[in-house]
Image: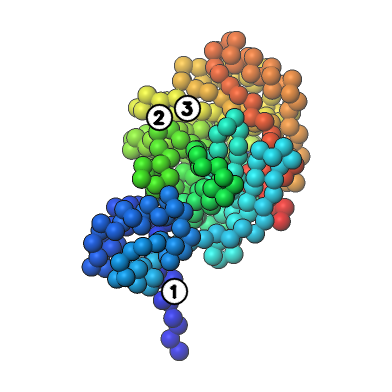
Amino acid sequence: MMLCPVKDAATDLYSLTRQELGSLLGSWGLSPVHAARIWNRLYLGLAGSVPELGDLPARVRSRLSSGARIGSLPVSLETDSSDGFTRKYLLSLADGERIETVLMRFTGRTTACLSSQAGCAMGCVFCATGQMGYRRQLSAAEIVSQAVHIARVLRSSGEHRGLRNVVFMGMGEPLHNYDAVMKAADILRDPNGLSLGAGRITLSTVGVVPGIRRMADEARPIHLAVSLHAASQQERAALVPAARRWPLDELMEACRHYCFTLRRRIFFEWTLIEEKNDSADHAHAVGRLIHGLPAQVNLIPLNPTSGYGGRPSHGEAARRFQRVLSEHYGIPSTIRQRRGIDIAAGCGQLAVAS
Ligand code: SAH
Ligand code: SF4
């Protein structure tokens, strides 16, 4: 008996750049001029299905109906933090995997926190996604679809300024899925679409050295945040197993390459764990390590996870860390509020809990 593969042969429109959409139309013998209208309906109209793409010549509509689709990621769970600033979605992929996407509203800015993989292979000891292990890469379309989901949520709640920022800080290691993440970023940046250009996208990496170098060499217009968590190779490798593959000295060299090639600032993330990496000595060690780079440090008190016994640092330890960085090394830092801790809003925690 023959299996019928027809449905899945349809191209997910979220997988295409605007130029590729034009080429697809061309390959069907249609004029690429329709691409602009379709793109507009996809990313400004936030159309959820091919019929919603609106007024198009019958020939275009019929070709799209048979050859294209608009991927959707149904919500299987959603939760609000008690302070109302964070809303977290557990989205289902076609093969049953589930990923997290978070909408954050801080200081008047709307930010979508996107996943780049289902699970993660990097195994950071304190991270719920790391504890879950690696499941699979996300496609560019699955990444774009998360941002569109958040844009729809904002529109339906009447927030017409829409989505302003995107961070790759959800599940997964974005530089372990380089091509799909960069393609999704290109689609999200398109000025005729979601228009998330000009510094609106930030990517956080555990420290995948070849990926950082590639971002620099390709001059990707994306902010880079590097998850440091420790300032010595030995301490770092105990928290972040990926440090054994990409040692701290190579990582710092790649960070310098990024900053000086692109003349750009870099962010470092530091998950504050009580009595593990939150002393004044630790702050001095990181200050010495990154001194001379145009850097900012984001301090994130640990979100407790079931697979790790560490505790979050107290506010006073976080403030002391901040003071050492600024007074001795002139390095600015922020303490990221653990907003949404009551909805298990740490990376990967909702997917583990459900
Ligand atoms: N894989 C990338 C991006 C996703 S994780 C990376 O590791 O950078 C985004 C940030 O959340 C990272 O800085 C990560 O170290 C941090 N993080 C993960 N689990 C956490 C937890 N339980 N508490 C606090 N920060 C956590
Ligand atoms: Fe992966 Fe980032 Fe979690 Fe580490 S912190 S396991 S790299 S998602």
The amino acid marked with disc number 1 is Lys
- Cα gap from disc 3 to disc 2, whole angstroms: 8 Å
- Cα gap from disc 1 to disc 3, whole angstroms: 44 Å
- Cα gap from disc 2 to disc 1, whole angstroms: 43 Å
Task: Determine whether, in the image, residue 176 is placed left or right of residue 26.
Answer: right
The disc label shown at residue 7, or none: 1
- Disc 3: CA contacts within 10 A as few (<14), some (14-19) or many (>=20): some
Task: Determine whether, in the image, residue 349 is placed left or right of residue 218.
Answer: right
Residue 104 picture location, percent across and down: 60, 39
Which label's residue is closer to the chain start, 2 or 1? 1
Task: Determine whether, in the image, residue 191 is placed left or right of residue 31.
Answer: right
Residue 283 picture location, percent across and down: 63, 19
Q: Quadrant of residue 300?
A: top right
Relative to the observer, which residue lies in front, 37 or 283? 37
Does dot 3 land on a helix, a strand or a loop?
A: strand
Mark 3 and mark 2 residues within 8 Å of each other at the beta carbon: yes
The amino acid marked with disc number 3 is Ile
* Residue to which mark 3 is pinned: 266
Q: Residue at x 39, y 47 (%)?
A: 193
* Residue to which mark 2 is pinned: 258
Which label's residue is closer to the chain start, 1 or 3? 1
In the rendered image of this protein, does residue 224 appear above or below residue 87?
Answer: above
The amino acid marked with disc number 2 is Tyr
Residue 311 picture location, percent across and down: 76, 34
In the rendered image, the quadrant that contains the N terminus is bottom left
Relative to the observer, which residue lies in front, 83 or 222? 83
Task: Determine whether, in the image, residue 125 is placed left or right of residue 51.
Answer: right
